[in-house]
Every structure is written in C-alpha cells, then in structure tokens.
C-alpha cells in the first residue's frame, strides 16, 4: 500500500479510535495530498511525490515549533510537535552525519570544488544524488566547513 492510501486508512482508524490530535495531523497531510492531485487531475500520488510533500510539511512544522517557542507559546509548540511526530511516521530516516559527510566529500571530489564560492555546485550534486536521503542543512554545514579549509 502506498503512502497516499496509507494516510487515508490511518485517518479512518484514528477517527474510529477518537484520537483527535492524530486525526487532525492526518487530515492536514491528506489535504496537502488532495491539493496536489487536483493540479493534474490524478487519482493518487506516487510515493516519491508524497515523500516530497511530507518533507515540506516536516520543514514547516519545525519552523513553526521554533517560532512558537521563541514567542513563549509552548501549547502551540506542543501541538505542532504532535503533528510533526505523525508526519515523521511516513518518512524514511535521513542519513546520519558520517554518511552525509562522505557524500559531501564525494561531491566535492567529483565537482572539483576548491573554495566557498563553489558551495552551490557541491550542494547541487549532493541534492541531485541523495535528495530524499539527506538533510540539506546538515549537508550545507558540512560542505561549508570542508570548502573553508
């Protein structure tokens, strides 16, 4: 079963179990999926498209959590964390720092980058090769360190 169908199925289960927080998170995920299907009148979405949408939702939730915490709104931050946990259930885990470092080093070697001005070329190579598997912020930080040396 694909991610698109899995979200719908879990939404039904959360409704039956009266899990309000989980249901709200699943509904927001499904809404994003349905909006995407309307763009090209598709019946369903591929897992690759779903993962991209879920990564975007994950990033939005992380930004919201940070903003709520800075504003001292802990209750809203907790709500966003609960939604983030549901979103992350559908996402594969990202590569750890050692793996990311190896990928960045390989991209630097293959692109011939030698300085900080070529960070974009390195990041482009890393993201093209490992888009769904790497944390872009971590890769950028590692690439900046390696190119600064």
Image (tube, helix red, strand yellow):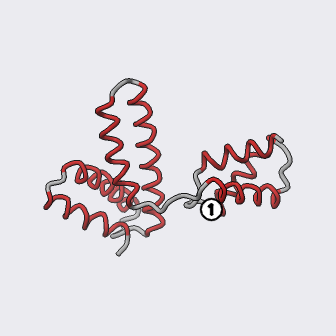
Q: Is residue 13 left or right of residue 65?
A: left
The quadrant of the rendering that contains the C terminus is top right
Q: Please determine whether, in this image, residue 68 is positioned above or below residue 21.
A: above
Secondary structure of the residue carrying numbered label 1: helix
Which residue in the structure is indicated by mark 1?
130
The quadrant of the rendering that contains the N terminus is bottom left
Which residue is nearer to you in this view: 47 or 83?
83
Residue under the image location 35 percent in, 59 percent down: 33
Q: Can you give x and y, in whole percent of width and height, for residue 30 in the image?
A: 30, 57
Q: Can you give x and y, in whole percent of width and height, for residue 61 in the image?
A: 40, 43
Q: Quadrant of residue 67?
A: top left
Q: Please determine whether, in this image, residue 132 is positioned above or below residue 60.
A: below
Q: Can you give x and y, in whole percent of width and height, for residue 146 in the image?
A: 78, 46
Which residue is nearer to you in this view: 129 or 39?
129
Residue under the image location 67 percent in, 43 percent down: 141
Q: Residue furthest bottom?
A: 1
Q: Please determine whether, in this image, residue 16 is positioned above or below residue 56.
A: below
């Amino acid at each position: 079963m694909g991610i698109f169908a899995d979200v719908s199925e879990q939404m039904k289960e959360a409704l039956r179990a009266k899990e309000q927080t989980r249901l709200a998170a699943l509904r927001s995920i499904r809404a994003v999926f349905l909006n995407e299907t309307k763009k090209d009148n598709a019946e369903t979405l591929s897992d690759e498209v779903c993962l991209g949408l879920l990564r975007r939702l994950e990033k939005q939730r992380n930004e919201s959590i940070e903003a709520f915490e800075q504003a001292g709104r802990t209750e809203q931050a907790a709500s966003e964390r609960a939604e983030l946990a549901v979103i992350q259930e559908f996402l594969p885990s990202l590569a750890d720092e050692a793996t990311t470092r190896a990928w960045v080093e390989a991209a630097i070697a293959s692109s011939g980058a030698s300085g900080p001005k070529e960070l974009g070329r390195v990041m482009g190579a890393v993201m093209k090769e490992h888009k769904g598997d790497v944390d872009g912020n971590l890769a950028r930080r590692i690439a900046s360190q390696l190119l600064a040396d």
